[in-house]
Image (spheres, rainbow, N blue to C red):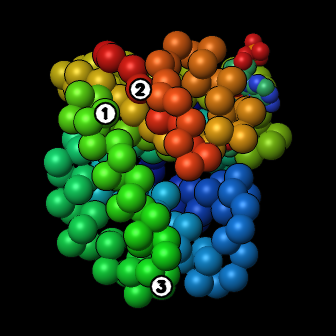
Amino acid sequence: MEIRPYQPKDYERMHKICYETSSGFDSEDGKKILYTMYCDYYINEEPESCFVAVNDDDEAVGYIICAPDDERYQRVFKEKYAPTLKELSLFKYLFHYAGEFFAKKIRKNYPAHLHIDILPEGQRQGLGTRLMDTLIAHLKGRGVKGVHLGCGASNPKGVNFYRKYGFKETPPFFGGITFFMEL
Ligand SMILES: CC(C)(COP(=O)(O)OP(=O)(O)OC[C@H]1O[C@@H](n2cnc3c(N)ncnc32)[C@H](O)[C@@H]1OP(=O)(O)O)[C@@H](O)C(=O)NCCC(=O)NCCS
C-alpha cells in the first residue's frame, strides 16, 4: 500500500472510512454530524495537509487529516461548520466546544491537530505509523511547532498507537485523553 496526498476523487472514501471506523452515528443526521465534526473541515479547507493510504486500485483505505493552525481552524470552523453542527445537535455542538475549551492551553503550544483512521483491512500493518511520519514531515516543513489530538481513553488501538509513536498525554478527562507532541 502507498501513502499519497489527498485528492478530490477520495472525497467519498474519506466519508466511508470516517463512518466505518466510528460508532454511534448511524442515522442520516448522525452521519452529517460525524462528517461535520471530524472530516469535512479538513478535506475542504486543508486538503494539502491530508494524506491517504491507498490499495492497488488507488482507493483510500486510511487517512490522516490535519488542521495545522489552531487560530485558522477556530475561525473557519466557527464561521462555516459550527452553525450546521448546532442546527443538527446542540449537544454535540456544546460537546465540541467543551473539548476545545479544556484543550485551550495545549492548543496554544501545539497548534496543529489531527485525526487518523484506517479501515480494519488496513490496520496493524504499519500504515498508521507511515501516515503519521508523512504528516509530521509535512508539518515540520511548514514550521509548525507542535501537534495534538483527542482520543477516547477506552480506545486501546488509538491509545497504544499514540503512546508507541511517542506522544505525551494528559490524564483522562471525561473519558478522553489529549495527546501532544513537540515537532
Ligand atoms: C489507531 C490506528 C490509526 C493505528 O494504525 P495502524 O496502522 O493499525 O497502526 P500500526 O500498524 O502503525 O501500529 C503501530 C503501533 O500501534 C499500536 N497498535 C496498533 N493497532 C493496535 C491494536 N489493534 N491493539 C493494540 N495496539 C495497537 C501498537 O503499539 C503498534 O505497534 P506494534 O504493532 O509493534 O505492537 C488504527 O488502528 C485505526 O484506524 N483504528 C480505528 C480508528 C481509530 O481508533 N482511530 C484513532 C482515533 S483517536
Mark 1 surroundings within 10 Å by alpha-carbon count, few (fewer than 14), some (14 through 19), many (20 or more): many
Q: Tell whether 115 sits left or right of 56.
A: left
Q: Quadrant of residue 104?
A: top left
Tag 2 near tag 1, CB within 8 Å: yes
Tell me the mark number nearer the camera, choosing from 3 and 1: 1
Left-right relation of 152 to 72: right
Residue found 47% across the figure and 28% down from its top:
170
Asked if ligand 1 lies within 8 A of label 1, the reply is no
Where is 132 relative to 112, above or below?
above
Residue located at (31% from left, 16% from top): 183
Name the secondary structure under disc 2: strand
Residue 106, labelled with which disc? 1
Task: Examine the image and state in which quarter residue 25 appears.
Answer: bottom right
Residue topped by disc 2: 180
Residue in the image at 51% along x and 67% along y = 35
Please state the horizontal and vertical placement of residue 163, each as a whole percent of the image.
60, 19
Asked if the beta carbon under badge 3 is closer than 8 A to the nearest atom of ligand 1, the reply is no
Name the quadrant of the N terminus.
top right
Which residue is tagged 3?
88
CA distance for labels 2 and 1: 8 Å
Question: Residue at point 82% right, 40% down?
Answer: 121
Q: Nearer the viewer, residue 3 or 33?
A: 33
Task: Residue 119 in the image: state x and y as whole percent.
Answer: 74, 46
Tell me the amino acid under the disc marked 2. Phe
